[in-house]
Amino acid sequence: MPNRRDLSHVGVATTRQEQKERTRQAILAAALELTSEQGFAGLSLRQVAREVGFVPTAFYRHFDSMEQLGLALVEQSFVPLRHMLRDARRDPATYDDVISASAQVLHRVVLANRSRFVFIARERFGGVAAVRAAIRHELQLFVTDLTTDLERFAQLQHWSADDVQMAARLFVNLMVSTAERLVETPSEAVREQEQIVTDVTRQMRLIVIGFAGWRPR
Amino acid sequence: MPNRRDLSHVGVATTRQEQKERTRQAILAAALELTSEQGFAGLSLRQVAREVGFVPTAFYRHFDSMEQLGLALVEQSFVPLRHMLRDARRDPATYDDVISASAQVLHRVVLANRSRFVFIARERFGGVAAVRAAIRHELQLFVTDLTTDLERFAQLQHWSADDVQMAARLFVNLMVSTAERLVETPSEAVREQEQIVTDVTRQMRLIVIGFAGWRPR
């Protein structure tokens, strides 16, 4: 059985760890807020520190550089979305189930993380090359994931790898366009938001209908 | 017959007009160049004037405001593309002709106007609301144009207006994604550029194959 001093040590460590994580989250939130006007390339470490309320050097306890902060923002936006979309596609009975589950997941994640997706939409073509590359990489992971999933469907098993990837990319492009439409529509505009979800559902169905008639090269 | 003085007057007027137009183009080019790092919201009138080489007040001979300059940049990018895509869709014999003509036009226009399309891609989610709205409006014009064109195809004549618009939007989204892929791929990477054009051609064909099986609600 551990003695009291050990326990207290663990307790303090956890609190410090939690405190550090809270500060990290505060830095990420401040950066998102501050970039909404000027873009990430225009943001300085000094501005972030002022917003969070600490001296600039304290920033380095959390991130090695502004670039690393940018990469953390990319990861924070994409990782939950990727996991949730994977879940939505797990053990699908029909295309229709996958399609409507994917549309719903996208809608939910974008609504709950609006400022992160505004960040992604803008920084895809922003001034920081490492951030642009990270976003491109994340989108490519969606294409790879979806290619693997599509290959399992009986209808596509005689398709060339190239054709399956072309179809996967079409879906991913559509997800990106839809996420962008969702972020540019106010969350309060429930009707318009639902229209976007209906639209993407029908657009995915139209593509899937084309699968049956596609003649591989 | 006009006398010499009149002719000389006309000559001077034309030259002044040309000079003014040249300066206007120089302002637009300088703004494009300067925004590539910091985004349009971070650009000041003073920076543009310094780059072009005149005093800040001279700016107002050409544009009422920075916002108006931003709107001119949007127009300059979209208007030629819209006209060329309309031409590509004029009197089409088959879907396939329209598809490959549209893909070629998009490729040509984006390659020839790379920095303008980088501007559009970034400022769609940039810090200036009027510029964002203008880009959205231009994209909506593409949807409206294409909806009208699609309605003429026999296969879609029993579709609801809503369904035709859903399909038009799918094509426009695909054009946007493709333009974005083209600008993020170096112009010298000829093979990758051609792969993107092949991809979008096949993606449009896959969608069109779906037309035959679509059951309107």
Image (spheres, coloured by chain):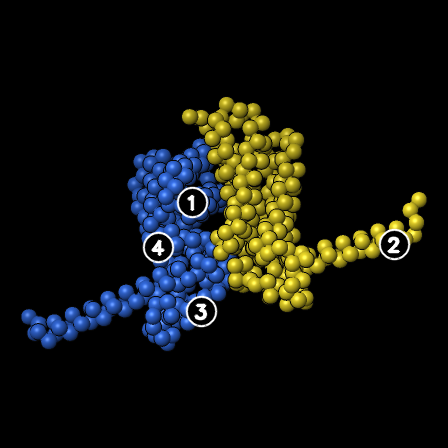
Chain colours: A yellow, B blue
> Which chain's residue wears label 3?
B
> Which chain's residue wears label 1?
B
Q: Nearer the viewer, residue A62 or A165?
A: A62
> What's the distance in space between the residues labelled 2 and 1, CA to CA?
56 Å
The amino acid on which the numbered mark 3 sits, given as a three-letter code, is Ser
> Which chain's residue wears label 2?
A
To which residue does mark 2 refer?
A8
Does residue A205 appear in the picture of this structure? no
> Which chain's residue wears label 4?
B
> What's the distance in space between the residues labelled 1 and 3, CA to CA?
29 Å
To which residue does mark 1 refer?
B185
To which residue does mark 3 refer?
B44
x then y, percent, for residue A205: 53, 36
Give the secondary structure at mark 3.
loop
To which residue does mark 4 refer?
B79
How crowded pointer 2 is (Cα within 10 Å; few <14, some 14-19, many 20+) is rated as few
Residue at x 52% of width, y 62% of height:
A42
